[in-house]
Amino acid sequence: MTHVVHLSSVHYPFDPRIFHKQLQTLSAAGYRTTLLVHHDESIVRDGVDVRSVGNVNTRLERWRNLPTLFREARAEDADVYHVHDPELLPIGVLLSLTTDARVVYDVHEDYADAIRVREWIPDPVKPVLQRVFPAIQGALTRPLDLVVTADDATRESLASRTSTPVETIRNLPKVAGIETDRIDLERSHEHVLAYVGGLDRERGLLNMLQVTARLRERGLDVGLWLLGPFQDKEIEREARRYMEREGIAEHVRLFGYVDYDEIFSYLSAADIGLLLVDEARFERNVPTKFFEYLYCGLPVVLTEVPSLEPYADSDYCVSVPERDLERATTEIERLLEDSDARQAMSDAGREAVVSEYSWEAERDRLLAAYAQLTGSPGTDGIAGPTDETARTDDEYE
């Protein structure tokens, strides 16, 4: 049985892209799958062996633990190593040079672009890092066997700097096995706006709070559901101060981290999905939550960001200029007061995901890439999803 080991020092063990999509896909196709990650305990879940390499509380502890992660990875004696964070690139290179395994580097986003909004990086250093990081990343990928990106723009940028094959495997939502009524939720407002993901300025936290306050000033009984953790203490303090000052604290529900299997129940209980993000931050990185909203039947009100131009159809979403919160408020008000329009957009959005924008198409790309790497995909000659797997995938994740 071909043994595949994924490594992450940054992500939560049950990260949607790593665990719910890639590892579960590989496990279902017959691969032996292991995830080395920081966690409280080692467990087996959904056919994946989640192996803890210790727990860390700070960024410095995480970096100090990298040698342990490398030793644990080598001890697995895997056929394929798949690393998920830029800080693990040196480990990927060492694994490539010291083992016979194939090594894959997974680029979740354009990291050079992300440097701009990393709070822990000193502002004077950011421009320098943004200039040099792409060249360093490209050089470190050359000894590897495959680079995977989540979008075409990042693939094109990286492909120009490395001799290693680069392939796009988009981070689209699964439409197999998901239950949208997994949790029984009660609404305390006539209308509910929803957002899923990390909470910070670039992802539109303050914009969403301002829009909620404006809608309530217009007399609409609106609540805001935020499904995700604050990205730092400062933005949390600023958000809470704003909510108290504007009198909307009781109308904003902060759920914190929500397990991937449960997110879709929350979204399906809302009316509109919000994506009022920073345009520069999402110039190339496609926010997966856009497709998750659509699958759950939510019309989406979003900032006009370049990465979503190919997908932002007026049949199921409304685009507004980045800083025009008055326009965003008016468009949301219009949709909330027109249930027929919301239903038509709901039906169109869900159909778009099921027919075009689902993980199932990307799954086949992942399996094909692994088949080429290993020469004998999975076990028992499994080269992709079996008929039984395909039948199981008729339900949403």
Image (spheres, grey):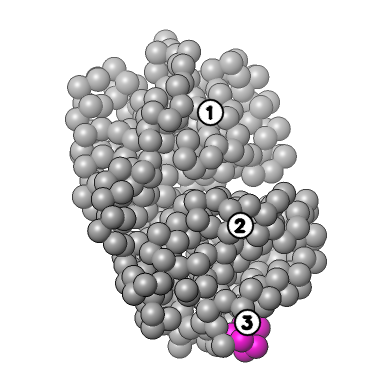
**Which is more foreground, mark 3 or mark 1?**
3
* Residue at image point 36% right, 43% down: 177
Disc 2 versus disc 3: distance between alpha carbons? 20 Å
For marks 2 and 3, give the one nearer the viewer: 2
What residue lies at 30% left-to-right and 33% top-to-bottom? 297
**Total numbered circles:** 3
x, y (%) of residue 8?
A: 62, 63
* Residue under pointer 2: 50
Would you call the spot at circle 2 few (<14 residues within 10 Å), some (14-19), or many (20 or more)? Answer: many
Say what amino acid the circle numbered 3 marks: Leu
For this rendering, which residue is in front, 144 or 137?
A: 144
Q: Give above or below for 197 relative to 169.
A: above
Q: Are marks 2 and 1 in contact (CB under 8 Å)?
A: no
Provide the residue designation for mark 3.
95
Task: Sort mark 3 into few (<14), some (14-19) or many (20+) by Cα contacts within 10 Å.
Answer: many
- Helix, strand or loop for the magenta stretch, by majority: helix
Q: Earlier in the sequence, mark 3 or mark 1?
A: 3
Query: Could you tell me the amino acid type at mark 1?
Result: Leu
Which quarter of the rendered picture does the C terminus lie within?
top left
SS of the residue at dot 1? helix
Type of residue at label 2? Val
Secondary element at tag 2? strand
